[in-house]
Amino acid sequence: MKLITHNILMCNKKGCTKNNFPLRLVVKQYADYEADNAQEYSANLMTRLLEKLDWNALKITVATLPDWGIALPDAVTPELAKDEAFLQSLHMLLVRRQIIDGEMVCPNCERSYEIKNGIANMLLQEDEV
Amino acid sequence: MKKSKKQRGEGETTKKLSTFKLKSFITFLSQVAQFPDPKIDLEQYMTPPDIAANLFSILHQDEDSIENKRIADFCSGTGMYSCASTYFNPLSITGFEIDPEAIEVAQENVLSMEIADRVDFINCDILKIVENNPKLHGLFDTVVMNPPFGTKNNEGIDMKLLSAAITCCKGKVFSLHKESTSAYIQKYVKEQHPGLEAELMHKIEFDLPNTYKFHKKKSATTEVVLVKIDVSKREVRKVTEMLGAQKLE
Ligand SMILES: [Zn+2]
C-alpha cells in the first residue's frame, strides 16, 4: 500500500465523522522498489499526483514516522513543484515506497485498520456500521 | 470515433493496438489467477482475459480513459481489471473488494506479474466506504467495475454499486451488466442521477464457465453489455445551471 492510498482513507466507522483523518499510520514493515522496477519517474507523473494529494495530511503523517528521516515543507510552492530534486524525492516517497505491514489508527475513536501483506483492511464489524 | 479519425489524420498519435500487441495483452492477462473457490452469494466470476483485453483496448484507444488517469476498480475480485489497467500507463490504480480471499489472490497476481507497485487493493464494503468517506467523492478520473449481476440474493446491488461508482468519479464510469437489465439501468441512471445517461457501448457474449459448481450445464452463456456513464457531463450541467441562475438574477 502506498501513501497516496493512505491519503484518501478515513475512519468509516458509523458515527465517527469528525477528526477521523488522516489515520495515524503505524509502519511495521515497508519496502522500496528500485527505480527500474517501479512506475517510471516523470515530472508530469509527479505533477498529476500532487494535484490530487492532501498535502497537509501527507506532511502530518510523514512527521509521525521519524525513522524515515523525511521532513516535508509546509506547502508545495510553484517553485518546488518544478524542482527536480524535490519531485524525485517525492517519487521515492509516493511511488516507490510500499507499506507491507502495519496499521492505521483513527485519531478520533482509536479504531485500528490493519495493513497486512500490503493490503489495507477497511472492513467493519456488523456493530460498527 | 471522430476523435480517432482526427488523431490518425495527424499521424503519430493513434493509440490503436496492433494485432500483435493485443495478443501480447491477452497473454499478459492470462496470468491473472481466478477465484480458487468462488462464493455464490458474491456472484464471483472473472472476465476472461481475451474479453478484458478487448475491453481495455477500447477504454484506452477510443475513450482515452486509462493513460495518465487515476483509476478505481470496484469489485476488483482477483484483479483482472486492475491488471488490465496497468498496461496503459495510468497515474494510479485502486482496487476495492469486499472478499478478503479474493483480494489475497489479487495481491499475489500483481506480485507475480511484477505490477504490484501500480495497484493498491483496499479490502472494504464499497457501499459503506463511499457513504462514509467524502474524500473518495469525485476523486477518480475513471471507475471500472464488474459488479455482481444482482440476480440471486443481492437484488439491486448492481445499481447501488453503479451509484457509488458515479459518486466517486469525475470522468467516466465503465460497468458490465446483464444485457437484459440495460433498459432498467438507463431509467435508473436518468432518475437517480439527473443530467447523466447510461450509454450502452458493446454487447458481449459471456461464458460463465463452471464458475459455480451448481450449474448443471458445463457453461452458460450470458449476454453482457458494457455501460458507459460520462460523469463529466454532470459538471457541465452544474455550470450551465449556475449560469442560468445568474442570468435570472
Ligand atoms: Zn474513528
Image (cartoon, helix red, strand yellow):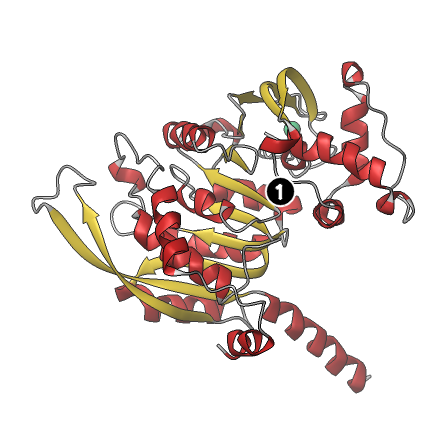
Q: Could you say which is closer to the camera, residue A85 or residue B170?
A: A85
Going by the image, does B249 lie left or right of B82?
A: right
Q: Could you say which is closer to the camera, residue B228 or residue A18?
A: B228
Residue at the far left in the pictured view:
B216
Horizontal and vertical percent position of residue B177: 34, 59
Asked whether mark 1 lies closer than 8 Å to ligand 1, one says no
Residue drawn 51% across and 78% down?
B5
Going by the image, does B216 lie left or right of A6?
A: left
- Note whether B19 is above or below B48 in the view shown: below
- Note whether B86 is above or below B185 in the view shown: above
Q: Secondary structure at mark 1?
A: loop
Mark 1 highlights which residue? B133
Residue at the far bottom in the pictured view:
B248
- Note whether A29 is above or below B81 in the view shown: above
Going by the image, does B233 lie left or right of B97?
A: right
Horizontal and vertical percent position of residue B26: 35, 48
Going by the image, does B72 lie left or right of A30?
A: left
- Please tell me in which quadrant of the rendered image residue A84 appears: top right
- Please tell me in which quadrant of the rendered image residue A60 appears: top right
Horizontal and vertical percent position of residue A50: 76, 45
Q: Could you say which is closer to the camera, residue B18 or residue A7?
A: B18
- Please tell me in which quadrant of the rendered image residue B103 appears: top left
How packed mark 1 is, by other alpha carbons closer than 10 Å (few <14, some 14-19, many 20 or more), is some
**The C terminus of chain B - image quarter:** bottom right
Residue drawn 54% across and 71% down?
B194
Identify the amino acid type marked 1. Answer: Asn
Ligand 1: image quarter: top right
Residue B9 visible in image: yes
Q: Pointer 1 indicates a residue of which chain?
A: B
Residue drawn 68% across and 71% down?
B238
